[in-house]
Image (cartoon, rainbow, N blue to C red):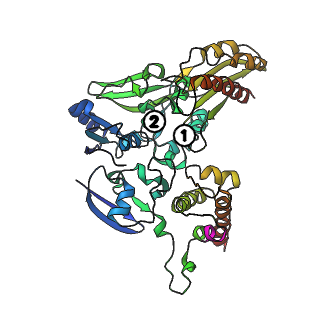
């Protein structure tokens, strides 16, 4: 067993883990943060995308011991707490836009799509359609045909730009 | 999928990694970014007894100018940091451009140049670049360091000339001087970034003709291949010669057949992609 410590969604955690434990299993099974999904489990589909020290990464292809000392951000940490009746108030602009633009059908790829899109928008706040498609190259959706996902990312980008300039 | 159990060693320096390799020999594997090795371990195609993690060896990250017309890229430099590095972009843009086509963004954030090369995968994009650039790799073992030419490094499928107790510390590439153009054509399945076939063309232009051409082929054999017949056919000729020269791009190759493509189809792709890459590079 190896001791690991990392900050996940702003909270510090420390555990003894088997070296072969994958980061996604650490998040889901040890921390019980099941917002991050396991899709293909072969580094292709991107459903398990989280941010590792600020950049998107496929958490099925990272050992928990490799993330020791890192900052991990998952889809669960995106929304601001919301006290009123409408829980969508605190949602991140990407979460809102995937909702309003119907950027999902089954929703399985969505946590990874949102985390990959967040990385893209941090690098490029105003991507055109091609840039969104290239930025999400590592994420597969088998329902939507991507059209509404691209729309959602560009809608969120516009809202984030507006928020930054106001 | 879960890898088989292994003992985990976190190396703090190159010397510590070499000591661990010396101690464990061929039972050990080095872990760089993990984006080639971990998928194999999850499928149990690889089950090393000891995993030596290089993630904390900071001396292996970064790019420097060697002062002899070459750049040295630390083996643990991640793809994203190679792509974005000012020295690489200024002096070896072809490496930055091809690295930007490796995998997908998440893979480029974790995968490393040394890990990708040392894995020796025929479908990986970087070996063909290193072959075309005639770059070298620096390996360090218990007896010191040695520099290995790209043409001597790749031996067979997933096999390099690294000894069991050696690790790649640096990748060295020449600075590109003069009116060179380049283009990498990569044919993939939509949902996967592995090259079914990839072709890197580099063309040095002079007074409207091609002074020198270099063509590196990805996944046309168990190791990266130079299309030397095409290169020779173009030297000193006008770009009009590209179509005829590219028709010989598959000569001397030995591609595999798999679910994605037959060997015959790969030969066809090599010819078509070589023409396209050369035309784009000569523009």
Q: Secondary structure at mark 2?
A: helix
Q: Is residue B180 visible?
A: no
Which numbered marker is on residue B116?
A: 2
The residue at 20%/33% (across/down) is B23
Please indicate whether residue B71 sits to the left or right of residue B46 in the image: right
SS assignment at label 1: loop
> Could you tell me how far apart the alpha carbons at marks 2 and 1 are, in whole angstroms?
10 Å
Question: Does residue B19 appear in the picture of this structure?
Answer: yes
Residue B102's label in the rendered image is 1
Which sits earlier in the primary sequence, circle 2 or circle 1?
1
Q: Chain of mark 1?
A: B
Q: Is residue A99 magenta?
A: yes
**In the shown orientation, is residue A74 left or right of residue A137?**
left
Image position, residue B139 (x, y; %): 37, 28
Tell me which corner region of the image, top left, top right, bottom left or bottom right, holds residue A149. bottom right
Read off the magenta span: A96-101
Estimate the x, y position of residue B254 in percent, counting from the top left: 53, 19
Question: Chief secondary structure of the magenta span?
Answer: helix
Q: Are marks 2 and 1 on the same chain?
A: yes
Rendered location of residue A73, percent (x, y): 45, 63
Q: Nearer the viewer, residue A67 or A44?
A: A44
Horizontal and vertical percent position of residue A81: 49, 79
Query: Label 2 neighbourhood size at 10 Å, few (<14), some (14-19), many (20+)?
Result: many
Q: Residue at x 44, y 50 (%)?
A: A41
Position of the C terminus of chain B, as image quadrant, is top right
Q: Residues within 10 Å of mark 1 (few under 14, many from 20)?
A: many
Residue B231 against residue B184 in the figure, above or below: above
B89 above or below B220? below
Whether label 2 touches label 1, CB < 8 Å: yes
């Amino acid at each position: 067993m190896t001791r690991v410590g990392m900050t996940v969604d702003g909270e510090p955690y420390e555990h003894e883990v088997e070296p072969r434990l994958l980061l996604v299993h650490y998040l889901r099974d040890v921390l019980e943060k099941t917002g991050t999904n396991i899709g293909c489990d072969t580094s292709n589909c991107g459903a398990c995308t989280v941010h590792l020290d600020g950049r998107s990464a496929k958490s099925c292809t990272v050992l928990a011991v490799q993330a020791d000392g890192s900052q991990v951000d998952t889809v669960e940490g995106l929304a601001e707490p919301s006290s009123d009746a409408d829980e969508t108030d605190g949602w991140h602009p990407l979460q809102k836009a995937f909702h309003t633009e119907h950027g999902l059908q089954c929703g399985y790829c969505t946590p990874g799509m949102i985390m990959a899109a967040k990385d893209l928008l941090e690098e490029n706040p105003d991507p055109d359609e091609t840039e969104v498609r290239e930025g999400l190259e590592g994420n597969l959706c088998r329902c939507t045909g991507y059209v509404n996902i691209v729309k959602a990312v560009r809608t969120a980008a516009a809202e984030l730009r507006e928020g930054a300039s106001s | 999928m879960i890898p088989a159990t292994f003992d985990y060693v976190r190396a703090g320096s190159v010397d510590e990694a070499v000591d661990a390799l010396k101690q464990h020999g061929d039972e050990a594997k080095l872990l760089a970014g993990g984006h080639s090795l971990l998928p194999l371990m999850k499928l149990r195609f690889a089950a090393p007894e000891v995993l030596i993690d290089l993630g904390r060896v900071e001396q292996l990250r970064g790019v420097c100018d060697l002062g002899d017309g070459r750049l040295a890229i630390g083996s643990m430099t991640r793809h994203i940091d190679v792509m974005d590095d000012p020295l690489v972009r200024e002096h070896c843009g072809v490496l930055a451009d091809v690295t930007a086509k490796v995998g997908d963004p998440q893979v480029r954030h974790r995968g490393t140049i040394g890990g990708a090369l040392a894995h020796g995968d025929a479908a990986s994009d970087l070996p063909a670049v290193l072959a075309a650039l005639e770059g070298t790799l620096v390996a360090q073992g218990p007896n010191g360091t040695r520099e290995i030419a790209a043409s001597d490094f790749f031996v067979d499928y997933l096999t390099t000339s690294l000894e069991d107790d050696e690790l790649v510390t640096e990748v060295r590439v020449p600075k590109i001087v003069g009116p060179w153009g380049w283009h990498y054509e990569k044919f993939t399945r939509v949902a996967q970034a592995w090259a079914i076939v990839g072709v890197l063309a580099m063309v040095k232009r002079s007074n409207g003709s091609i002074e020198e051409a270099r063509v590196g082929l990805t996944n046309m054999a168990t190791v990266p291949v130079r299309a030397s017949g095409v290169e020779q056919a173009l030297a000193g000729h006008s770009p009009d010669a590209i179509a005829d020269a590219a028709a010989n791009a598959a000569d001397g190759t030995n591609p595999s057949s798999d679910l994605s493509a037959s060997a015959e189809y790969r030969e066809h792709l090599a010819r078509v992609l070589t023409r396209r890459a050369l035309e784009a590079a000569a523009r």
